[in-house]
Amino acid sequence: MIFVECPRDAWQGLTRFIPTEQKIAFITKLLEAGFTHLDCGSFVSAKAVPQMQDTEAVLEGLPDTTADLLCIVANEKGLERALACGRVTSVGYPLSISDTFQRRNTNHSLEDSWDIVAEMQSRAGRLRFVVYLSMGFGNPYNDAWSQDIVLESVAKLRALGVQDIALADTYGQADATRVYTVTHAVIDQFGAAGIGVHLHARAENAIELTHAALKAGTTWLEGALGGIGGCPFAGDDLVGNLPTEFILPLLMPQTDLERLRMLTAQALEIRDQFI
């Protein structure tokens, strides 16, 4: 089972800038606690996401680790920055099924974004290239969506050589039935290897959604301590991520619950300080 802790997703929508040293200290605590996969920054425009303008400095300040350190990129320039930063091991590109959201999130049309995916896949080199299939469970814009479109998109990504694909409920609108049905259909056609699920959800339905994704066969889930975050480009409200403190003990019963509680308290303190 792969679990990705996402401080980047937790922090990107906070209005006040978290000092670089404070980011380094918190991510270091995550590494010390044994998290092996972290979504910890993004190489995007500082104007678009000012919270992430110090990603290079944060990464350089982290201790040596064998953990997978992923950063989000939105274009080839972002990929170049990631390749130049020796600490990054993976990059994630948000590719939306919804053209409306793709334009809002990356300032590119969906048609142009497929060309960007192909180019970045060919240039990723040493980096693991992950595509987050945004609005994978529907969208609020009345753009075309169906399970067949999801399957076609995954097939097209695999044809381009993209092996790691996370189905993302960017807007946080999917119920457990849709999470199960879509995820199961994708895994049934393409196998579980390289298929993840990144859900935005309220705390009250997070466990139900998690069980649905696990029942569908996924072995890769993502979340954030305190359920903090969400995509600031999807809507006016940040719906939140799957709360790690609820989800991780379900996936890994050996989890140190006291340490998890302490990390959750620290994550919430950061949110309250910089919201």
Image: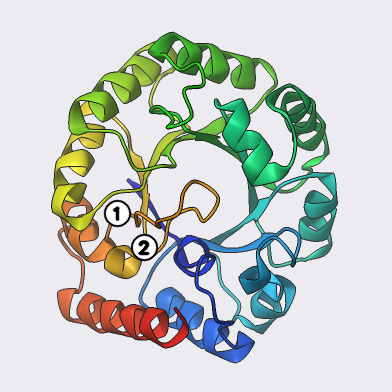
In the displayed structure, would residue 213 be above or below residue 7?
above
Mark 2 and mark 1 in contact (Cβ < 8 Å)? yes
- Disc 1: CA contacts within 10 A as few (<14), some (14-19) or many (>=20): many
- Residue 219 location, quadrant: top left
Quadrant of residue 175 within the rendered picture: top left
Q: Residue at x 36, y 66 (%)?
A: 228
Relative to 29, say whether 110 is above or below.
above
Q: For numbered disc 1, what is the local secondary structure?
A: loop
Q: Residue at x 29, y 54 (%)?
A: 242
Mark 1–mark 2 distance (CA, rounded to whole Å):
6 Å
Q: Residue at x 72, y 25 (%)?
A: 114
Q: Position of residue 151 (x, y in %)?
A: 47, 14
In the figure, 43 relative to 148: above or below? below
Category of crowding for the residue at label 2, using alpha-carbon neighbours closer than 10 angstroms: few (below 14), some (14–19), many (at least 20): many
Residue type, numbered disc 2:
Ala
Q: Nearer the viewer, residue 78 or 255?
A: 78
Q: Is residue 191 left or right of residue 24?
A: left
Disc tally is 2
Quarter occupied by the N terminus: top left
- Measured as percent of width and height from the top left, residue 267 is found at 36, 78
**Which label belongs to residue 224?**
2
Mark 2 residue element: loop
- Label 1, on which residue? 242
* Residue at x 78% of width, y 32% of height: 116
- Say which amino acid is labelled 1: Leu
